[in-house]
Amino acid sequence: MTTQDLRRVLVLGRTLTASVDRETPTPRVWLLDEVSAILGWSAILKGARDNTDFGDDTVVATGSRWAEGEDIEGNLMAGRAGSGTRRWRTLYPMSFREFTSATAPELGLPDRLHPAELQSGVARSALENYGFFVDDFDLAWQAYLTTGGFPRAVAEHSQLGAVTDSFIADLEAWLHRDVEPAASPESVPLLLNALATRSSSPFSVSSAAQELSYGKGVLDLRLRRLIASHALVRCPRREAGQIVPGAQAKYYLADPILSWLPSRRRSGLPAPDMTQLTESIIGVTQARAIDVIDEGRLPHGDTIGYVRTSNDKEIDLGPVVVPTSTGAGMTVPLESKWVDHGRKSEARTISAKFDAGILATKSVLDLEGRVWAVPAPLVALMLL
């Protein structure tokens, strides 16, 4: 369809329902499914809202296709949000909380907490009640890391015990269409593999581009497309909560199944490392949790960030400024350490830099001292 077709749909839709306006003008409810396939769609809707009765209607526009130059925020969001409403409603894959509620409803879940309160007295009291269930949550977390949160994947996991090859192929087709339409089909697994295997370190675009036989500009474009398609979350370097200009960022694939796609679709590519995958999903979970309390930060890449210490070590998720009920606050520093033991050096790193924080472990729950060890699934559940 073209923009002219979209204009015609809006005119015909109102004309064919003219009978409802006999006594008084009646607003319509429009569902425009996959409208993002039409280049320039947001400008058409803006013109209709500004100049016709379409501006009084309720419009639901869905789409998954990324298009460079489509100014959705400027055309449809600015100045059009009602009081007390969220302008952005992005349908993300299921969180670990939603996954667990669907697949293991017998597990009681801790309440969500504000990201700045993960080491509060409330958090301590909540975590103390889950010491006997650490292994159950560990198994649920591993199931989530191998399944992800796309509803079809969760259904297949529940009914068949694994995500099917056909769904993995559908995901690859989506990304190929939106991110690399001019490249060969095998390019998507190779790109996702490069991101997944480098997720625990700052991402060098130049070296990755050379490995993938891209130009640096081409890889930059594909990273932006992945982010715009909500398949990738950027984790920049921060100091004192502020983004460090020009520093290399980390990149986290937004759902676990995307990290499995390379090995499922191309022989010879490695399965994802569970430690790296845990770090990625904890980062994505915190980014989504911050966006819940401070709308619009995730689409603009202003949610999370890693930190370097004076001896050039990294802390996965440093503190960032977030709104609280009493004013501005800071999130709790987080370091992913998916192990059952040997966590003391990471604890010392956090303590030296920030005095306090949390290590997201595999199954260790230790609330003594200034740096807590908390199983990664419990960290995820408290966040989102």
Image (spheres, rainbow, N blue to C red):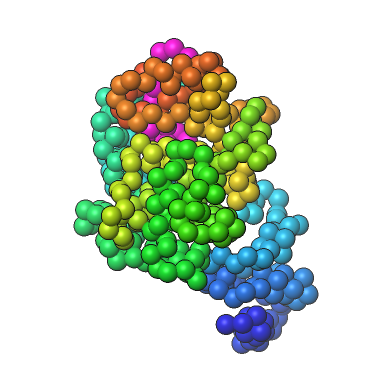
Q: Could you say which quadrant of the image residue 51 lies in? A: bottom right
Residue at 65% across, 66% down: 70
Residue 377 vs residue 264, the one in the foreground: 264
- The count of marks equals 0
What x and y, as percent, mark residue 132? 26, 24
Q: Is residue 221 left or right of residue 376?
A: right
Residue 7 vs residue 351, the one in the foreground: 351
Residue 250 vs residue 61, the one in the foreground: 250
Q: Quadrant of the N terminus?
A: bottom right
Q: Is residue 208 above or below residue 171?
A: above
What x and y, as percent, mark residue 49? 73, 71
| Residue sitting at the far right | 51
What x and y, as percent, mark residue 191? 44, 56
Indicate yes or no whether the magenta region holds residue 371: yes
Q: Is residue 310 above or below residue 84?
A: above
Q: Is residue 274 left or right of residue 184?
A: left
Q: Is residue 20 above or below residue 69?
A: below
Confirm whether residue 324 shows in the render. no
Q: Which stretch appears magenta? A: 368-384
Confirm whether residue 36 shows in the render. yes
What x and y, as percent, mark residue 334? 48, 28
Residue at 45% across, 56% down: 212
Indicate yes or no whether the magenta region holds residue 73: no
Q: Could you say which quadrant of the image residue 347 lies in? A: top left
Residue at 44% across, 33% down: 382
| Residue sitting at the far left | 160
